[in-house]
Image: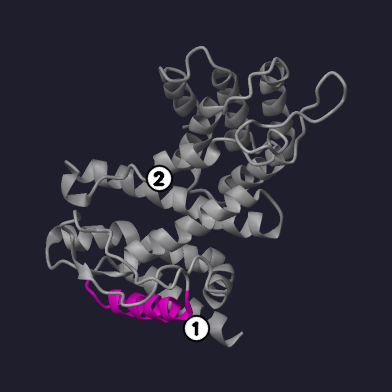
Amino acid sequence: MAYNWASRLSKDRYLHGSEALQVIPVIREVVENGRAPSEVANRIASIYEPRIRRGNLDSPTGLWRVFCSAIDHFGGDEDTLARLVALLQCLSEIEVLDENGAPIHSTMNGDTFWRQLPGFALTFRDAITSTPYVDMMKDDAEFEEESRRFYNLNVFQAQWLVKVGQSGSQREWGSAVNYALWHIGDALEYGVANTPSGLRRTELWIPQAAQWILIAGDVIYQLCQDREKNTGEPATDKGQLDRAVDGFLFEGEEGFSMQRWIFWKERFVRISDLGVKPYVSQLASSAARRMSEIESS
């Protein structure tokens, strides 16, 4: 499977002529052979070091395309996903030195080049937000492919939220916090249209929302207690174009809050009884139970 992935990706026209083609077999070793993330991070840094030392401080977009593709295709394996998370963390800790032994800084953020993973957040955003509305998917095969990609990318971000919350890039911390708010909210704060596409949208969105809670629930609960990103302004409906939803249900403020936490838990309970597929119902129930456990801990 990893061989086929690497072979297909090497034909990506966006990667031709870039260092990213050299990265593909290196990341394949993480996926296929369980190579130590620290070793792989150093190998990736060595591939990009010559261009960085020549003064090319542009975002290594090709690298991030390869990395996001690896999450998409292999993130369903828990051990592989953990190694990919660790790989990104190790890469953020590497310094590239100039001829005088001083750290080279990124022009994007002013920090040492790899510290804030320059450009990763933008490339990841493009990957995770390109999921089409369910009524625009042409068949079950496309739905299954999009579901896998959306699920794996969100599970990665939930793991990343926990990881960078302990120590890591503050830029990536902010991105992970945003994804938690957006993707739990979009899953739970809309009514479910009484149509096949309404149920299908629920089957796409609820599994990833549940994983945010199961993986990073403690962090998210603290964000709610701290009212992170809470502007005091009323929350707004951002799903007007999605025909698989039936109205915006949350009547609270933008950002994290305990009101939102309680609403999310109630919605998990409600959706678990909605007649969705059993695995979706089980995940929703598990998330609601986990939220209760966190509250009482």
Quick check: 157 left or right of 245?
right
Quick check: 49 left or right of 155?
right
The residue tagged 1 is 292
Q: Residue sitting at 37 percent across and 65 percent down?
A: 185
Query: Which mark is drawn over residue 128?
Result: 2
Report the number of numbered marks: 2
Q: How far apart are marks 2 and 1 (CA)?
A: 29 Å
Using a 10 Å C-alpha cutoff, classify the residue at mark 1 as few (fewer than 14 neighbours), some (14 to 19) or many (20 or more): few
Q: What stretch is highlighted in magenta?
A: 257-275
Using a 10 Å C-alpha cutoff, classify the residue at mark 2 as few (fewer than 14 neighbours), some (14 to 19) or many (20 or more): some
Q: Which of marks 2 and 1 is nearer the N terminus?
A: 2
Select label 2 or label 1 by which is in front: 2
Residue type at numbered disc 2: Ile
Q: Is residue 25 above or below residue 151?
A: above
Where is residue 273? Give x, y as percent. 27, 78
Where is residue 18? Give x, y as percent. 54, 16
Query: Which mark is drawn over residue 14?
Result: none
Residue at the extreme right of the image, as rendered = 100
Residue type at numbered disc 1: Ser
Q: In this view, does 120 lie above or below 289?
A: above
Local SS, label 2: helix
Q: Residue sitting at 32 percent across and 42 percent down?
A: 145
Q: Residue sitting at 29 percent across and 46 percent down?
A: 144
Local SS, label 1: helix
Where is residue 15? Give x, y as percent. 47, 19
Q: Are marks 2 and 1 in contact (CB under 8 Å)?
A: no
**The C terminus lies in quadrant:** bottom right
Magenta stretch contains residue 258: yes
Residue at the extreme bottom of the image, as rendered = 296
Q: Residue sitting at 30 percent across and 56 percent down?
A: 204
Where is residue 172? Give x, y as percent. 58, 49
